[in-house]
Amino acid sequence: MIHYPSDSPARTVTVDLGQRSYPIYIGSDILGRFGEAFESHCGRRRAVIISDQTVWDLYGPTVEQSLRRANVETQAVSVPPGEKSKCLAMVEMIYGRLFEFSTERSDVIVALGGGVVGDLAGFVAATFKRGLPYVQVPSSLLAMVDSSIGGKTGINHPRGKNMIGAFHQPQMVFADCATLKTLPARELGCGLAETVKHGIIRDAAFFASLEANSQPILALEPDRLIELVERNCRIKAAVVSADEREAGLRGILNCGHTIGHALETVWASRGGDIHHGEAVSLGLVAAGRLALRRSLLRPDELERIRQLLGSFRLPVRIEPPGGPEAIPANADRAACALPGDLPEIPLATLYEAMRHDKKVQAGRIRFALPKSIGNCVFQDDLTESEIKQAISSLGE
Ligand SMILES: NC(=O)c1ccc[n+]([C@@H]2O[C@H](COP(=O)([O-])OP(=O)(O)OC[C@H]3O[C@@H](n4cnc5c(N)ncnc54)[C@H](O)[C@@H]3O)[C@@H](O)[C@H]2O)c1
Ligand SMILES: [Zn+2]
């Protein structure tokens, strides 16, 4: 169970999965105390820290030293930063290092980094010698509010993202919001897109608090960040606890992702520069349009969704060709549009990409659509023309 020191500034959210339940610790400037939490959960077992080079350079030594202070022996492996590291070759490289370290099943993997490292290290932990325990130390907002919770681990295959993987729950999640100070603004935005999604699908009051606090959140005020991460974790933990293996309810987390994934895949395959959270932001607007059409959402509610995403500097529309004037030259991503060429990407291509998503069942595309703000319903009878219309409307 949970034995975090009582003087700790960390908040705790529990992912309730019976025997496999685990805590998520959330605080600010707590990384130096990671060793204590590790030791109280995992004992003095050896730790193998897996990280990416960027995160390792910033935070690896702090984590390593805190483990050593707790008398935990450590080894470390790092991979290049970025989605390309979520591949089989990198898994093999890490297996090789684990053999060199004489890693045993009693050792613990520590995933220190964003969602890429979490998914990759989690997959290694799930498979090496048929499974090692692991701990998540998320350093990106997306990893803190989404990918580190719920036990989905995996890598990409040339035929599709996240196609090879395993469910493997961590022993604990340890999130230090102070690490977000070094996270590039665009990456912060990607985490905020998932945050807005959580409000839309599950919690109207949380959505309203995001509307009221977007500026302090963007300014990385520690208390606001801790609260933000905690509330997100409560939502994701509740969904995962109710449906660990995505037999039903967990599918609501895909809200905005059906169209979002298709945009991300097609755009990226054409050399376009789009991040997952940006695609999700556009996907949420498109899902909102579908919901509006089915009278699940009111126009003013769709407008609130667009406004909130925009206030987090996320794209809510795609600029038609020749019209990127809305994008300030100094913007890291300070505008609400992606310079794009949607009209040049045939809608049929996007629709095809959606049909190849692994969430498609019996040929039917199942959408999780907002039902007012704070609720979500599944809809699998949307017509091809309705879907294409919703995508086209992103250019308006
Ligand atoms: N398992 C799940 O349930 C789940 C859910 C959502 C997303 N994901 C996966 O998560 C991945 C995306 O995660 P991500 O957005 O964190 O990407 P990421 O891990 O690539 O991190 C983004 C970038 O930020 C850098 N970074 C991370 N933390 C930093 C920090 N504190 N300071 C400075 N730089 C930092 C990284 O080096 C990287 O360059 C995708 O592969 C996606 O499929 C998994
Ligand atoms: Zn996502």
Image (tube, rainbow, N blue to C red):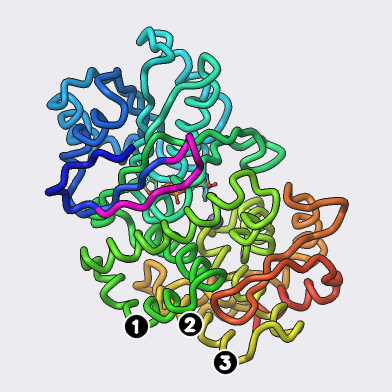
> Which residue was labeled with disc 2?
326
Q: Amino acid at mark 3?
A: Asp
Residue at (16%, 26%) from the top-left corner? 70
Residue at (42%, 65%) from the top-left corner? 192
Q: Residues within 10 Å of mark 1 (few under 14, many from 20)?
A: few
Q: How far across and how far down the image is residue 186, in percent?
A: 39, 61
Image quadrant assignment for residue 261: bottom right
> Which residue was labeled with disc 1?
212
Q: How far across and how far down the image is residue 172, in percent?
A: 37, 39
Q: CA distance from mark 1 to mark 3?
A: 17 Å
> Which residue was labeled with disc 3?
300
Q: Label 1 CB, ligand 2: below 8 Å?
A: no
Residue 49 highlighted magenta (yes or no): no
Asked if residue 255 is positioned above or below residue 46 in the image, the reply reads below
Q: Amino acid at mark 2?
A: Ala
Residue 20 highlighted magenta (yes or no): yes
Residue at (48%, 36%) from the top-left corner? 20
Q: How many marks are shown on the rendered structure? A: 3
Q: How far across and how far down the image is residue 216, in percent?
A: 26, 74
Label 3: which secondary element: helix
Q: Is residue 310 visible?
A: no
User: What segment carries the magenta color?
Assistant: 11-21
Q: Amino acid at mark 1?
A: Ala
